[in-house]
Amino acid sequence: MSERAVVTAGTGGIGLETAKGLARHGFTVTVVGRDAERGTSAVTEIAAVATGAAPRFVAADLASLDQVRALAARLAAEGPLKVLVNNVGAMFTHRRSTVDGIESSFALNHLSPYLLTELLLDRLREAGPSRIVNVTSAAVKAARRTFDAVEPPGGYYGFHWYGRAKLAHLAYTLHLADRLRGTGVAVFAADPGGAATSMTDGTMTSPEIVSPPLRLLWPLVRRTFARATAGPASVAAAPSVFAATDASLEGRTGVLIGPGARRVPVFRGADDPRTVEKVLELSRRLAPLDDGHRARHA
Ligand SMILES: NC(=O)c1ccc[n+]([C@@H]2O[C@H](COP(=O)([O-])OP(=O)(O)OC[C@H]3O[C@@H](n4cnc5c(N)ncnc54)[C@H](OP(=O)(O)O)[C@@H]3O)[C@@H](O)[C@H]2O)c1
Protein backbone atom coordinates (compact mmCIF):
# COMPACT_ATOMS: atom_id res chain seq x y z
CA MET A 1 0.00 0.00 0.00
CA SER A 2 1.43 3.41 -0.90
CA GLU A 3 1.96 6.01 1.80
CA ARG A 4 -0.30 9.00 2.35
CA ALA A 5 0.61 12.60 1.63
CA VAL A 6 -1.58 15.68 2.03
CA VAL A 7 -0.99 18.94 0.15
CA THR A 8 -3.07 21.92 1.23
CA ALA A 9 -4.05 24.37 -1.51
CA GLY A 10 -3.08 21.53 -3.80
CA THR A 11 -5.58 22.12 -6.61
CA GLY A 12 -3.73 24.96 -8.34
CA GLY A 13 -0.45 26.85 -8.60
CA ILE A 14 2.58 25.54 -6.73
CA GLY A 15 0.47 23.17 -4.60
CA LEU A 16 -0.82 21.25 -7.62
CA GLU A 17 2.74 20.84 -8.96
CA THR A 18 3.86 19.70 -5.50
CA ALA A 19 1.05 17.15 -5.41
CA LYS A 20 2.10 15.88 -8.86
CA GLY A 21 5.70 15.59 -7.66
CA LEU A 22 4.64 13.53 -4.65
CA ALA A 23 2.35 11.36 -6.77
CA ARG A 24 5.30 10.65 -9.11
CA HIS A 25 7.20 9.45 -6.03
CA GLY A 26 4.44 6.95 -5.32
CA PHE A 27 2.50 8.73 -2.58
CA THR A 28 -1.27 8.47 -2.33
CA VAL A 29 -1.99 12.18 -2.49
CA THR A 30 -4.88 14.12 -1.01
CA VAL A 31 -5.21 17.69 -2.23
CA VAL A 32 -7.21 20.26 -0.30
CA GLY A 33 -8.91 23.33 -1.77
CA ARG A 34 -12.27 25.10 -1.75
CA ASP A 35 -13.52 24.66 -5.27
CA ALA A 36 -14.85 21.22 -6.29
CA GLU A 37 -14.38 21.80 -10.03
CA ARG A 38 -10.74 22.77 -9.55
CA GLY A 39 -10.44 19.76 -7.25
CA THR A 40 -11.73 17.37 -9.90
CA SER A 41 -9.46 18.71 -12.60
CA ALA A 42 -6.45 18.63 -10.23
CA VAL A 43 -7.14 14.98 -9.42
CA THR A 44 -7.20 14.14 -13.14
CA GLU A 45 -3.83 15.86 -13.64
CA ILE A 46 -2.27 14.18 -10.60
CA ALA A 47 -3.65 10.74 -11.54
CA ALA A 48 -2.00 11.04 -14.95
CA VAL A 49 1.47 11.06 -13.35
CA ALA A 50 0.81 9.00 -10.20
CA THR A 51 2.79 5.82 -9.65
CA GLY A 52 0.92 4.89 -6.44
CA ALA A 53 -2.75 4.72 -5.48
CA ALA A 54 -5.33 7.13 -6.88
CA PRO A 55 -5.25 10.74 -5.66
CA ARG A 56 -8.31 12.51 -4.31
CA PHE A 57 -9.67 15.92 -3.50
CA VAL A 58 -11.05 17.02 -0.12
CA ALA A 59 -12.91 20.32 0.11
CA ALA A 60 -12.12 22.75 2.93
CA ASP A 61 -11.89 26.49 3.27
CA LEU A 62 -8.67 26.81 5.22
CA ALA A 63 -9.57 30.36 6.18
CA SER A 64 -12.09 28.88 8.64
CA LEU A 65 -10.65 27.37 11.81
CA ASP A 66 -13.75 25.16 12.18
CA GLN A 67 -13.16 23.78 8.69
CA VAL A 68 -9.49 23.20 9.51
CA ARG A 69 -10.56 21.22 12.60
CA ALA A 70 -13.08 19.20 10.59
CA LEU A 71 -10.46 18.50 7.90
CA ALA A 72 -7.93 17.40 10.53
CA ALA A 73 -10.49 15.07 12.14
CA ARG A 74 -11.28 13.52 8.75
CA LEU A 75 -7.64 13.05 7.79
CA ALA A 76 -6.71 11.75 11.24
CA ALA A 77 -9.49 9.15 11.11
CA GLU A 78 -7.85 7.68 8.00
CA GLY A 79 -4.67 6.55 9.77
CA PRO A 80 -0.94 7.30 9.64
CA LEU A 81 0.23 10.23 7.54
CA LYS A 82 3.68 10.19 5.98
CA VAL A 83 3.87 13.71 4.51
CA LEU A 84 2.00 16.93 5.26
CA VAL A 85 2.76 19.85 2.95
CA ASN A 86 1.32 23.06 4.36
CA ASN A 87 1.30 24.88 1.07
CA VAL A 88 -1.68 27.13 1.71
CA GLY A 89 -0.90 30.83 1.68
CA ALA A 90 -2.28 34.04 0.31
CA MET A 91 -1.62 37.74 -0.04
CA PHE A 92 -4.40 40.32 -0.11
CA THR A 93 -4.36 43.77 -1.67
CA HIS A 94 -6.77 45.08 0.96
CA ARG A 95 -7.23 44.15 4.58
CA ARG A 96 -9.72 41.31 5.07
CA SER A 97 -11.00 39.24 7.98
CA THR A 98 -11.92 35.57 8.04
CA VAL A 99 -15.21 34.12 9.33
CA ASP A 100 -13.44 33.88 12.69
CA GLY A 101 -12.78 37.64 12.62
CA ILE A 102 -9.02 37.16 12.19
CA GLU A 103 -6.96 39.14 9.69
CA SER A 104 -6.81 36.92 6.61
CA SER A 105 -3.07 36.87 5.82
CA PHE A 106 -2.22 35.83 9.37
CA ALA A 107 -5.02 33.26 9.37
CA LEU A 108 -4.14 31.60 6.05
CA ASN A 109 -0.36 31.77 6.14
CA HIS A 110 0.12 30.87 9.77
CA LEU A 111 -2.85 29.99 11.99
CA SER A 112 -4.52 27.53 9.66
CA PRO A 113 -1.39 25.45 8.93
CA TYR A 114 -0.39 25.71 12.60
CA LEU A 115 -3.72 24.23 13.69
CA LEU A 116 -3.82 21.53 10.99
CA THR A 117 -0.29 20.43 11.86
CA GLU A 118 -0.89 20.27 15.61
CA LEU A 119 -4.08 18.25 15.10
CA LEU A 120 -2.30 15.76 12.81
CA LEU A 121 0.86 15.25 14.86
CA ASP A 122 -0.24 11.90 16.32
CA ARG A 123 -0.86 10.54 12.83
CA LEU A 124 2.48 11.86 11.59
CA ARG A 125 4.26 10.24 14.56
CA GLU A 126 2.57 6.92 13.78
CA ALA A 127 3.92 7.03 10.23
CA GLY A 128 7.48 7.98 11.30
CA PRO A 129 9.86 8.62 9.80
CA SER A 130 7.53 11.25 8.40
CA ARG A 131 7.87 14.85 7.22
CA ILE A 132 6.11 18.17 7.55
CA VAL A 133 6.91 20.77 4.89
CA ASN A 134 5.87 24.37 5.52
CA VAL A 135 5.94 26.69 2.54
CA THR A 136 7.60 30.01 3.25
CA SER A 137 8.62 33.06 1.21
CA ALA A 138 11.44 35.54 0.81
CA ALA A 139 8.82 38.13 1.83
CA VAL A 140 9.70 37.28 5.47
CA LYS A 141 12.58 39.73 5.01
CA ALA A 142 10.12 42.63 4.58
CA ALA A 143 8.24 41.80 7.78
CA ARG A 144 7.90 43.82 10.96
CA ARG A 145 8.99 41.55 13.76
CA THR A 146 6.29 42.51 16.19
CA PHE A 147 3.83 39.85 17.31
CA ASP A 148 2.05 41.34 20.33
CA ALA A 149 -1.19 41.13 18.34
CA VAL A 150 -2.42 39.56 15.10
CA GLU A 151 -2.09 42.90 13.32
CA PRO A 152 1.08 44.95 13.47
CA PRO A 153 0.80 48.66 14.31
CA GLY A 154 0.54 51.04 11.34
CA GLY A 155 -1.19 50.79 7.99
CA TYR A 156 -2.14 47.71 5.99
CA TYR A 157 0.39 46.79 3.30
CA GLY A 158 -0.43 43.37 1.90
CA PHE A 159 3.13 42.36 0.98
CA HIS A 160 4.57 43.25 4.39
CA TRP A 161 1.67 41.68 6.32
CA TYR A 162 1.98 38.57 4.18
CA GLY A 163 5.71 38.45 4.91
CA ARG A 164 5.04 38.89 8.62
CA ALA A 165 2.52 36.01 8.64
CA LYS A 166 5.06 33.84 6.77
CA LEU A 167 7.67 34.87 9.34
CA ALA A 168 5.32 33.78 12.14
CA HIS A 169 4.97 30.42 10.44
CA LEU A 170 8.70 30.06 9.84
CA ALA A 171 9.33 30.79 13.54
CA TYR A 172 6.76 28.12 14.41
CA THR A 173 8.38 25.72 11.92
CA LEU A 174 11.81 26.01 13.56
CA HIS A 175 10.28 25.68 17.02
CA LEU A 176 8.36 22.57 15.94
CA ALA A 177 11.47 21.00 14.41
CA ASP A 178 13.20 21.32 17.80
CA ARG A 179 10.16 20.13 19.70
CA LEU A 180 9.81 17.00 17.56
CA ARG A 181 13.50 16.06 17.51
CA GLY A 182 13.81 12.33 18.16
CA THR A 183 10.13 11.57 17.46
CA GLY A 184 10.60 10.49 13.84
CA VAL A 185 8.79 13.56 12.51
CA ALA A 186 11.08 15.92 10.59
CA VAL A 187 10.04 19.49 9.87
CA PHE A 188 11.26 21.50 6.89
CA ALA A 189 10.58 24.91 5.41
CA ALA A 190 10.47 25.26 1.63
CA ASP A 191 10.86 28.58 -0.19
CA PRO A 192 9.54 28.24 -3.75
CA GLY A 193 11.27 31.40 -4.91
CA GLY A 194 8.54 32.69 -7.19
CA ALA A 195 6.07 31.63 -9.84
CA ALA A 196 3.32 33.06 -12.00
CA THR A 197 0.23 31.87 -10.13
CA SER A 198 -3.17 33.26 -9.20
CA MET A 199 -1.64 34.65 -6.02
CA THR A 200 1.04 36.65 -7.76
CA ASP A 201 -1.15 37.66 -10.73
CA GLY A 202 -3.86 38.82 -8.37
CA THR A 203 -1.78 40.97 -6.04
CA MET A 204 1.68 41.90 -7.14
CA THR A 205 0.68 44.54 -9.67
CA SER A 206 -0.80 46.89 -7.08
CA PRO A 207 1.46 49.53 -5.48
CA GLU A 208 -0.84 49.44 -2.44
CA ILE A 209 0.70 46.17 -1.28
CA VAL A 210 3.96 47.87 -0.28
CA SER A 211 4.63 50.60 2.29
CA PRO A 212 4.68 54.27 1.15
CA PRO A 213 8.50 54.55 0.99
CA LEU A 214 8.64 51.55 -1.33
CA ARG A 215 5.76 52.96 -3.43
CA LEU A 216 8.04 55.85 -4.37
CA LEU A 217 10.20 53.23 -6.05
CA TRP A 218 7.21 51.33 -7.48
CA PRO A 219 8.42 50.95 -11.11
CA LEU A 220 11.59 49.33 -9.79
CA VAL A 221 9.77 47.27 -7.13
CA ARG A 222 7.21 46.11 -9.67
CA ARG A 223 9.90 45.04 -12.12
CA THR A 224 11.63 43.10 -9.33
CA PHE A 225 8.36 41.37 -8.40
CA ALA A 226 7.63 40.62 -12.07
CA ARG A 227 11.08 39.08 -12.59
CA ALA A 228 10.84 37.06 -9.37
CA THR A 229 7.42 35.64 -10.21
CA ALA A 230 7.82 34.95 -13.92
CA GLY A 231 8.68 31.24 -13.71
CA PRO A 232 6.45 28.16 -13.88
CA ALA A 233 4.86 26.66 -10.77
CA SER A 234 6.46 23.31 -11.61
CA VAL A 235 9.92 24.78 -10.93
CA ALA A 236 8.72 26.58 -7.79
CA ALA A 237 7.35 23.27 -6.43
CA ALA A 238 10.79 21.63 -6.49
CA PRO A 239 11.83 22.78 -2.98
CA SER A 240 8.65 21.33 -1.41
CA VAL A 241 8.97 18.03 -3.29
CA PHE A 242 12.66 17.79 -2.35
CA ALA A 243 11.92 18.58 1.32
CA ALA A 244 9.18 15.95 1.38
CA THR A 245 11.06 13.16 -0.35
CA ASP A 246 14.81 13.52 -0.73
CA ALA A 247 16.89 10.82 0.92
CA SER A 248 19.74 13.27 1.64
CA LEU A 249 17.48 14.86 4.31
CA GLU A 250 17.06 11.64 6.30
CA GLY A 251 17.95 12.32 9.93
CA ARG A 252 17.76 16.11 9.38
CA THR A 253 15.16 18.57 10.62
CA GLY A 254 14.67 22.35 10.87
CA VAL A 255 16.23 22.86 7.44
CA LEU A 256 15.16 25.45 4.86
CA ILE A 257 15.13 24.31 1.25
CA GLY A 258 15.26 27.22 -1.16
CA PRO A 259 14.79 27.80 -4.88
CA GLY A 260 16.55 25.19 -6.98
CA ALA A 261 15.94 22.71 -4.12
CA ARG A 262 19.15 23.86 -2.42
CA ARG A 263 19.63 24.04 1.32
CA VAL A 264 19.79 27.73 2.33
CA PRO A 265 20.36 29.52 5.65
CA VAL A 266 17.20 30.40 7.57
CA PHE A 267 16.40 34.11 7.82
CA ARG A 268 17.84 35.03 11.19
CA GLY A 269 14.74 36.81 12.53
CA ALA A 270 12.82 33.53 12.45
CA ASP A 271 14.71 31.88 15.29
CA ASP A 272 14.56 34.87 17.61
CA PRO A 273 13.23 33.39 20.91
CA ARG A 274 11.03 36.44 21.56
CA THR A 275 9.39 36.07 18.14
CA VAL A 276 8.83 32.35 18.71
CA GLU A 277 7.34 32.94 22.15
CA LYS A 278 4.96 35.68 20.94
CA VAL A 279 3.87 33.67 17.88
CA LEU A 280 3.13 30.63 20.05
CA GLU A 281 1.18 32.75 22.53
CA LEU A 282 -0.98 34.19 19.74
CA SER A 283 -1.46 30.82 18.06
CA ARG A 284 -2.52 29.03 21.25
CA ARG A 285 -4.96 31.79 22.12
CA LEU A 286 -6.57 32.11 18.68
CA ALA A 287 -6.53 28.41 17.70
CA PRO A 288 -6.73 26.48 20.97
CA LEU A 289 -5.86 22.78 20.98
CA ASP A 290 -7.90 21.92 24.06
CA ASP A 291 -9.65 18.59 24.48
CA GLY A 292 -13.05 20.22 24.07
CA HIS A 293 -12.17 21.22 20.52
CA ARG A 294 -10.66 17.81 19.73
CA ALA A 295 -13.71 15.94 21.07
CA ARG A 296 -16.28 18.10 19.31
CA HIS A 297 -14.69 17.54 15.94
CA ALA A 298 -13.31 14.01 16.27
N1 LIG B 1 3.72 32.26 -6.26
C1 LIG B 1 4.82 32.75 -5.72
O1 LIG B 1 5.58 33.50 -6.36
C2 LIG B 1 5.19 32.41 -4.31
C3 LIG B 1 6.41 32.88 -3.80
C4 LIG B 1 6.77 32.53 -2.49
C5 LIG B 1 5.92 31.75 -1.73
N2 LIG B 1 4.73 31.32 -2.25
C6 LIG B 1 3.86 30.49 -1.41
O2 LIG B 1 3.60 29.28 -2.11
C7 LIG B 1 2.31 28.76 -1.71
C8 LIG B 1 1.46 28.52 -2.95
O3 LIG B 1 1.33 29.74 -3.63
P1 LIG B 1 0.68 29.89 -5.06
O4 LIG B 1 1.28 31.08 -5.69
O5 LIG B 1 0.68 28.59 -5.75
O6 LIG B 1 -0.82 30.29 -4.64
P2 LIG B 1 -2.17 30.17 -5.48
O7 LIG B 1 -1.91 30.05 -6.93
O8 LIG B 1 -3.03 31.30 -5.03
O9 LIG B 1 -2.77 28.82 -4.89
C9 LIG B 1 -3.93 28.32 -5.41
C10 LIG B 1 -4.39 27.20 -4.53
O10 LIG B 1 -4.74 27.69 -3.23
C11 LIG B 1 -6.03 27.18 -2.91
N3 LIG B 1 -6.63 28.06 -1.90
C12 LIG B 1 -6.67 29.40 -1.91
N4 LIG B 1 -7.34 29.86 -0.82
C13 LIG B 1 -7.73 28.76 -0.12
C14 LIG B 1 -8.47 28.58 1.07
N5 LIG B 1 -8.96 29.59 1.75
N6 LIG B 1 -8.69 27.31 1.50
C15 LIG B 1 -8.22 26.25 0.79
N7 LIG B 1 -7.51 26.37 -0.34
C16 LIG B 1 -7.27 27.61 -0.79
C17 LIG B 1 -6.71 27.16 -4.25
O11 LIG B 1 -7.85 26.35 -4.28
P3 LIG B 1 -9.36 26.98 -4.28
O12 LIG B 1 -9.30 28.27 -4.97
O13 LIG B 1 -10.20 25.95 -4.90
O14 LIG B 1 -9.67 27.11 -2.85
C18 LIG B 1 -5.62 26.54 -5.10
O15 LIG B 1 -5.52 25.14 -4.84
C19 LIG B 1 1.72 29.80 -0.76
O16 LIG B 1 2.00 29.44 0.56
C20 LIG B 1 2.49 31.07 -1.13
O17 LIG B 1 2.51 31.98 -0.06
C21 LIG B 1 4.35 31.63 -3.52
Image (spheres, grey):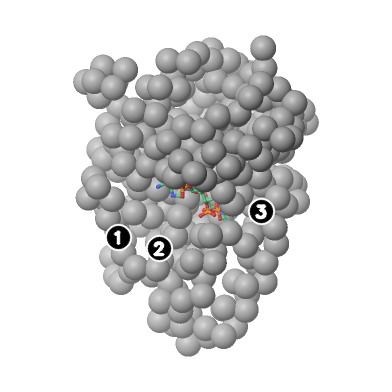
**Residue 39 in sight here:** yes
Kindly state the secondary structure of the residue where label 3 is placed.
helix
Please say if 174 is above or below 222: above
- Image quadrant assignment for residue 110: top left
Mark 3 residue crowding within 10 angstroms, few (<14) / some (14–19) / many (20+) = many
- Image quadrant assignment for residue 197: bottom right
x then y, percent, for residue 198:
53, 60
**Left or right of 54 in this view: 202:** left
Mark 2 residue crowding within 10 angstroms, few (<14) / some (14–19) / many (20+) = some
Q: Earlier in the sequence, mark 3 or mark 1?
A: 1
- Image quadrant assignment for residue 70: top left
**Residue 291 in sight here:** no
**Left or right of 257 in this view: 102:** left
Kindly state the secondary structure of the residue where label 2 is placed.
loop
Q: Which residue is mark 3?
A: 233
Please say if 32 is above or below 1: below
Q: Which residue is mark 1?
A: 96
Q: Residue at x 42, y 53 (%)?
A: 165
Label 2 vs label 3: CA separation? 20 Å
**Whether the residue under disc 3 has CB within 8 Å of ligand 1:** yes
Whether tag 2 and tag 1 are in contact, CB under 8 A, the answer is yes
Label 3 vs label 1: CA separation? 26 Å
Q: Amino acid at mark 1?
A: Arg
x then y, percent, for residue 135:
56, 45
